[in-house]
Amino acid sequence: MALQVIDIEADNFPYNNERFADIQMLRYKLNGFENLTPNQKAYIYYLSEAALWGRDITTDQQGKYNLEIRNLLEGVYTNFKGDKNTDDWKAFTTYIKQVWFGNGIYHHYSQDKFKPGFTEDWLRNQVKSCKIKVKNLDTLCKVIFDPTLLAKGVNLAADADVVLTSAHNFYGEGVTQKEAEDFYAKMKEGKGANLPMFGLNSTLIEKKGKIVEDVWKVGGKYGKYISKIVANLNKALPYAENDKQKEVIEKLVKYFNSGNLEDFDEYSIAWVGTLEGMVDFICGFIETYGDPLSMKGTYEGIVQYKDLEATKRTKTISDNAQWFEDHSPVNPIFRKPKVKGITANVINTAMLAGDSYPSTPIGINLPNSDWIRAEHGSKSVTISNITDAYNKAAHGNGFSEEFVIDEETRKLIEDYGDDCDYLHTDLHECLGHASGQLLPGTDPDALKNYSSTNEETRADLFALYYLADPKLVELGLLPNDEAYKASYYSQMMNGLMTQLVRIKPGDNIEEAHMRNRALIANWCFEKGKKDNVMELVKRDGKIFLKINDYKELRNLVAELLAEVQRIKSEGDFDACKNLVETYGVKVNKEIHENVLDRYKKLNIAPYKGFINPVMTPVFDENGKVTDVKVDYTETYDAQMLRYSKQYGTK
C-alpha cells in the first residue's frame, strides 16, 4: 500500500481520512510529544503496548462469535484475488470496516447488528477460493446473515429480559436477568458499606447447575491477553516518572494476577492519589455501558500526557469544587458536605485501545466506585487533541447553516461554542460525575439497566446548570454572561433534533448518552410549554428550535437536576424508569424525517472514529528506549490487520 505523506504542522495536518457507511475516520495529532523526555516517551510506549494487548478481549466481550467472524473476514480480505470493482467486494469491504470499528458485528452506538450487503453464497465462495480453514462456517454464516439471530448487542427495552436478549458476551448461555440480579444481591448481603463493584471483571455462567463467575485474570478467562498486558506494564515500570506511578502499576499488576476486586479498589485509590508527572493511563475493565445491567466492565485503554496550558482551566474548576457543590440546586442532604480529591487535567491522548478505539470519549471521570469517590476523590480528564480533531474536521461542513435557526444564534455559537464545549466537558467530568452522594443504605446498583442513562443525565445537567452561572465569568472561564447560550442552544437542539440522524426510522433511542440528551431536552421542552420557554418552528418545510427564555430554561435544568440527583441518592428505580422511558426513548416521527432529509443533503457522516499514530521505539546498545518515533501515515485497514496479527494470540 502506498504511504500518505503527512505534514504535521497544525494548519496542514489532515484530520479527515477515509469514510465508509455512517463513519468518518479521523487522525489525531500528538501535540507537544516531541518536547517530552526520552523516559516519558518510553513510558508512554510501553503503556500503549499494554493497552493494545486487550483489543481481542473487547471484541470477545461484545459477542461470542466476534473473534471468529473477524478472523474469517480478514482471511478473505487479505487473500481475495477476484475483481475488486464488483458490488459484492465493495459491500464486503464496508462490512469488515464496520466490524473493525465496532469491535464486533454490532454498531457501537445503536447496538444493531450490521447488515452485510453481500450474499452468503458470495462469502462461502470466497472462503473456498481463498482456501481459508473455518471450523464453524455454518454457524458463523447464520450469525452474520440471519437478522433475527443475536439481533441486538445490548437490548434495553423496558419489557425485555435484558440479559437473555442482549448478545454481548458478559453472561453465559441461558443466564437470565433475574438470576444475575439475585446472584449479585446475595453477594452483597451482610457485607456493609464500601463494597467493591461486584461483577465488574467476570462472565456470569451456569456450571453444574449453579450460577458462578468466570473471572478475567491471569490464569483465568482472557488470561493469555492479560498476561501480555502485565508483561508490558512491567516493562513500563523502569520508566515511570515517580514512585507513585510505580505503585499504581504494581497494584494494577497485582489485580490482574488475582482478579480480586478488593485489589482493584486498592489500585483505584492509588491511581486517584497519583497527581504528579506528565503521563497517566487507564487500562482494564472500566466502563459498564456494554452490560445491560451496568455492572460488567468492557476492556479499554487510554494513554495520555498533560496539556499544561489548557490544564489551568480545569485547575480553576477543581480548586472551586466545594463552591460548586455547595451551590448546587439539589436537596442539601444529597450534596457532599466535604468534597475530596477532585483533580482535573486537560490531556493529549497518545494511544486509544479497547472500547475507546476507534470511537473514543472526549472526557473521562474515574473511578466509578461511589464510595471511593466519596472518601478518596476522583480524577477527570478532558481530551484536548481529540476535541481539536473533531472541531477542525467539522469546519465548514454546513451543519450550523442548515440547523441553527438564525444568524444571531449562529454567531453566538461561532463566537463561544468551542469554549463552552470544553467547559461543558470539564464540568461534566470533573464535577458532575463527582458531585452528590448516596444516602446511607442505598445500593449503588439500584437503578439497574437505567443506571448509565441516569448518571450521564446527572453529569450533563450539572454542567448545563453551571455554564449559565455568573461564577464562570467571575473565574475568567467565560467572557460574559451571554456565552452560555451557545451551549444551551446546541445541547437542546441536539437532544430534540439533530442527534436523531443516528437513529434508523422506526427505531427507539437505545444508547445511554443519547437517551440522556433526549431526556433533558424533551423534559425541558415539555415542562416549559406553558411559559413558551422553547418552541419548534417550521420555515420553508424545515423545523428549527427557538429558545425564547434562556433564564427560565436554566431554572428547568435546575429542577430536573434536583430530581435526577434524588433518584440516584435514594436509588428510586421506578422514578428513574419512568423518567427515561417517558422522555429519553421515543422518537418524534415528523422531526426525525425532517432532520434525516436535511442531514442527508449535507453528506456528513454522523459518527467519527480515529486511526492511532504508530509508535516506534529507538533502543541503545543496552536495550534502553532512548526515543520514540511517531508516524501518522498508516491506513485504517493496515492498522486493523496489523493489530490482529500483532496483538492476537491465535
Image: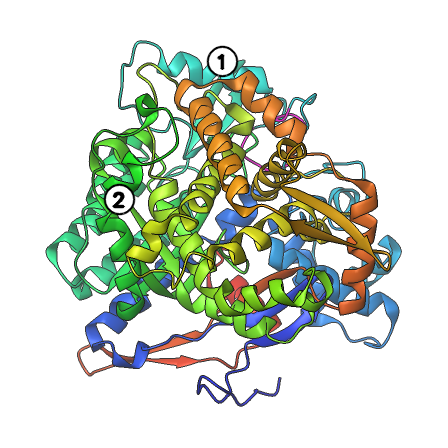
For the N terminus, the image quarter is: bottom right
Above or below 455: residue 640: below
Picture coordinates of residue 388 (x, y %)? 47, 70
* Residue 55 position in % (x across, y down): 49, 54
Q: Residue at x 29, y 56 (%)?
A: 474
* Residue 170 located within the stretch drawn in magenta: yes
User: Can residue 39 be seen at all in this image of the molecule?
Assistant: yes
Residue in the picture at 61% in, 39% down: 515
Asked if residue 118 is positioned above or below residue 10 in the image, the reply reads: above
Residue bounds of the magenta highlight? 162-171
Q: Residue at x 25, y 56 (%)?
A: 316
**Left or right: where 8 falls relative to 513:** left
Q: Position of residue 259 (x, y in %)?
A: 33, 35
Which amino acid does the dot numbered 1 rest on? Answer: Asp
Which quadrant holds residue 128?
bottom right
Q: Is residue 361 magenta?
A: no
Residue picked out by circle 1: 182
Total numbered badges shown on the rendered structure: 2
| Rendering quarter of residue 437 | top left
Where residue 597 sits: x, y (%)? 83, 58
Q: Residues within 10 Å of mark 1 (few under 14, many from 20)?
A: few
Left/right of residue 4 with respect to residue 480 in the rendered view: right
Q: Residue furthest left?
A: 243
Quick one: which residue is furthest to the top in this view? 190
Of labels 1 and 2, the one closer to you: 2
Which residue does the numbered mark 2 point to in the structure image?
A: 321
Residue 115 appears in view: no
Label 1 and label 2: CA atoms lie apart by: 38 Å
What's the amino acid at mark 2? Ala
**SS assignment at label 1:** helix
